[in-house]
Image (cartoon, rainbow, N blue to C red):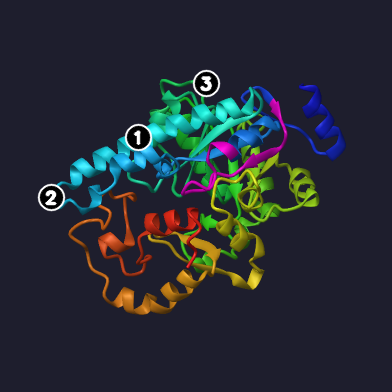
């Protein structure tokens, strides 16, 4: 073990986590898009001996030349297929750049991961671009990545890590992947009542279901893995509401190998978002955090900014007028299924890429 890492672990009283044969701090910085966890943050976390996670979705936002290359494409009528092709190509190039930059910043320490949402339309393209760029791990949430072993078939050394929320999901993924002769290298157990962003529950009413509690999911998942004889092969990483040293010790005592944190890293100096974004997030009180249905059809949790307040007030009217659109308003169809584009009234009715890009540059109003 690296001497500096050993000293950190000794001082913290935490147990190390082993992924891909490497002993690490039991800390995974969660992937946050659009652009909140880019190479600066991920590379810094890895340099400290943890897992730094990039976000693939619309990664071009941190690359002015790629933004210039794709500027104005959305306004072209009748050329949506070419727009999608060019934007996807720019984002895949950005993914490769981000991995290289994070790797350089890590100075050979820790691991560099790429988070890809299963719900995005270019999911397979993002995964392939990440693997070809030599990323250490691919982390997939916002849907069940049943096909991830197929996409990674030519990359046996890359770590594959699904994000799940209950023991049933763990059993399903392990059994499905086992048939493909590949097991998860770790599993993130994300509590939908405690995490931010997109959440792993079918509907908002399910967020408080006790089946998601760490005290239940971690022991049940470990019991299943133990019965299959693979308990030591698949470490569990707890995510959602982890804030303190005591929180980490608590979930490690339950059997988790490590933890994943998002918000605490998002507001750091090294975080890749605008200072105004960080300020709003850091100053938010618990009563300012709201839950709603995303345009991806998943429950989501976010700070109730002026824009979100206005949107939620207008939502009943927007839902009443929901209808299938002739095209995506940005023309590149970032989501495989979109409540706004596809006229799904019970889903969100806003352009998620537009709003996340605005938040990234500090426009929270």
Instruction: Give the mark toward the camera: 2 or 3.
Output: 2
Q: CA distance from mark 3 to mark 1?
A: 19 Å
Circle 1 residue: 125
Q: Quadrant of residue 6?
A: top right
* Disc 1/disc 2 C-alpha distance (Å): 23 Å
> Residue 188 in the image: x percent, y percent?
59, 43
**Where does residue 46 sit, x and y in percent of width and height?**
64, 32
Give the alpha-carbon distance from disc 2 to disc 3, as whole Å.
42 Å
What residue sits 26% from the left and 65% below the top?
343
Residue 46 in the figure: left or right of residue 199: right
Q: Residue furthest left?
A: 78
Task: Name the disc covering residue 78, or none.
Answer: 2
Q: Residue 316 location in percent, x, y?
A: 36, 78
Tell me where residue 134 appears, x and y as whole percent.
48, 23
Q: Is residue 323 left or right of residue 29?
A: left
Figure quadrant of the N terminus = top right
Residue 289 occupies which quadrant of the picture?
Answer: bottom right
Q: Main secondary structure of the magenta part?
A: loop
Disc 3 target residue = 157
């Amino acid at each position: 073990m690296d001497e500096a890492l050993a000293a950190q672990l000794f001082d913290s009283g935490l147990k190390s986590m082993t992924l891909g044969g490497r002993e690490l701090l039991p800390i995974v910085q969660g992937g946050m898009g659009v652009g909140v966890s880019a190479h600066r943050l991920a590379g810094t976390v890895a340099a400290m001996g943890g897992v730094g996670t990039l976000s693939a979705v619309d990664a071009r936002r941190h690359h002015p030349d790629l933004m210039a290359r794709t500027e104005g494409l959305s306004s072209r009528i009748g050329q949506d297929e070419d727009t999608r092709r060019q934007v996807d190509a720019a984002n895949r190039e950005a993914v490769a750049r981000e991995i290289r930059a994070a790797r350089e910043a890590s100075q050979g320490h820790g691991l560099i991961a790429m988070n890809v949402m299963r719900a995005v339309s270019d999911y397979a393209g993002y995964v392939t671009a990440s693997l070809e760029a030599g990323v250490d791990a691919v982390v997939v949430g916002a849907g069940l990545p049943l096909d991830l072993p197929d996409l990674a078939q030519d990359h046996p050394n890359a770590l594959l890590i699904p994000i799940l929320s209950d023991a049933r999901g763990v059993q399903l993924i392990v059994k499905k992947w086992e048939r493909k002769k590949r097991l998860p290298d770790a599993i993130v157990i994300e509590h939908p009542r405690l995490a931010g962003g997109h959440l792993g529950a079918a509907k908002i009413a399910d967020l408080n279901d006790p089946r998601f509690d760490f005290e239940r999911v971690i022991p049940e998942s470990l019991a299943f893995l133990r019965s299959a004889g693979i308990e030591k092969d698949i470490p569990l990483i707890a995510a959602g509401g982890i804030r303190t040293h005591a929180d980490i010790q608590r979930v490690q005592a339950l059997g988790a190998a490590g933890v994943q944190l998002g918000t605490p890293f998002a507001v750091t100096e090294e975080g890749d978002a605008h200072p105004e974004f960080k300020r709003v997030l850091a100053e938010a009180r618990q009563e300012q955090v709201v839950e709603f249905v995303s345009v991806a059809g998943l429950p989501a949790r976010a700070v109730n900014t002026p824009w979100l307040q206005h949107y939620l007030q207008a939502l009943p009217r927007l839902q009443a007028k929901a209808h299938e659109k002739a095209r995506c308003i940005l023309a590149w169809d970032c989501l495989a299924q979109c409540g706004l584009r596809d006229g799904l009234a019970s889903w969100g009715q806003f352009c998620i890429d537009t709003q996340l890009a605005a938040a990234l540059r500090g426009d929270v109003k």
